[in-house]
Amino acid sequence: MCELPLTTDPNLLAGVEKCEDAGVYKLNDELAIVQTLDFFTPIVDDPYDFGQIAAANALSDVYAMGGKPLTAMNIVCFPVKTMDISVLKQILAGGLDKIREAGVVLVGGHSVDDQELKYGLSITGTINPARVVFNSGARAGDRLILTKPLGTGIINTAAKGAIAGKEAIDQAVRCMSTLNRIASELMMEAGVNACTDVTGFGLLGHACEMIEGADVGMVIYSKAVPLLPEVREFAAMGLVPGGTYRNREFRSSMVEVAADTPDDLLLILFDAQTSGGLLISTPSAQAERLLRSLHGRGTAEAAIIGEVIAEPKGKIVIR
């Protein structure tokens, strides 16, 4: 979109000009709407699970901004001539159950006949415009909290190759279908400086977005990053999605890697996630308290994985 003229509006608090997770439009001094849209091809075999994951993934963009999602609309591309309609029914049932869990109302949607199956949702939510959490507000001294383990892209690749077992697949599905609702609510109660959700660009790709052009950098403690079971073994076997390699190539100039960092671990840090956790930048004084709150509310794998530093600016250091 770099050659397209962007629309400017004094009430547009977040739009396409920045790498924010959702658009935010101010209606008045007390109320803004948060809007996002996301859909993709199946990443798991079970249609109901796919629907749940797609819904959780779409909702996550609103949660990352600190918003409260209110309504949803389905987006469906379905091969009506080659696939039984019961598959679509299961996908929509999974999505509906997940948005109901989020307290969101389905208000409609749109479908087209397409040779390749795709599903997702458009989500609209609200937030006080003074409380929007952007991905660009991290401050030196902040601690970084990640609320879900990494590795869903690698495990999904291993599953496609019939290498991943049922336990690993089930863990990945549970991770991807878990809402970021509680994490978002707790971070808003605590007050944080920045947040993004970890999805297709991987942990390091989204962390780079948080510091790009900023006066801060980051340190990631690689051994502290939570990982899904067996993901390192799969990464070492080369069961890595193409998007993960593209993430590493695109952002390598912003990342300084310690000489003793294993290559399989670095790939996991760049792994293209689906419906990943929130990456939260919070003042050091409240990081442990927020982490305890997350653990107490069931976000058991949340961890402090790094910190925001004054130097080097615009760089992520892997230790």
Image: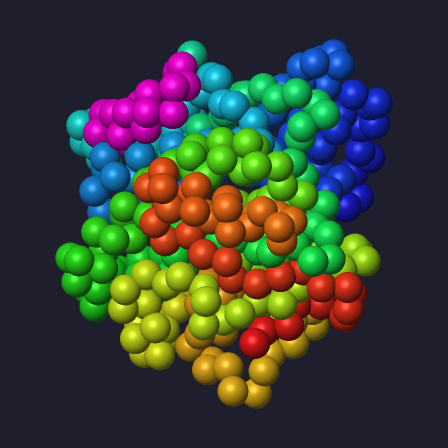
Q: Residue at x 31, y 35 (%)?
A: 52
Q: Point out the residue furthest to the left here.
A: 166
The answer to whether residue 98 is magenta is yes
Q: Residue at x 43, y 47 (%)?
A: 292
Q: State the extent of the magenta-drawn residues as a range.
A: 89-106
The location of residue 213, given as percent across then percent down, is 79, 56
The location of residue 246, given as percent across then percent down, is 55, 65
Name the residue nearer the viewer: 169 or 38. 169
The location of residue 26, given as percent across then percent down, is 72, 19
Name the residue nearer the viewer: 95 or 33. 33
Q: Point out the residue furthest to the bottom here.
A: 259
> Can residue 53 be seen at all in this image of the molecule?
no
The location of residue 258, given as percent across then percent down, is 58, 82
Task: Name which quarter of the figure residue 82 lies in.
Answer: top left
The answer to whether residue 160 is magenta is no
Q: Residue at x 35, y 79 (%)?
A: 236
Task: Name which quarter of the figure residue 84 lies in.
Answer: top left
13 w.r.t. 257: above or below: above
Quarter of the image with the C terminus in it: bottom right
Q: Residue at x 49, y 35 (%)?
A: 186
Main structural element of the magenta stretch: helix, strand or loop?
helix
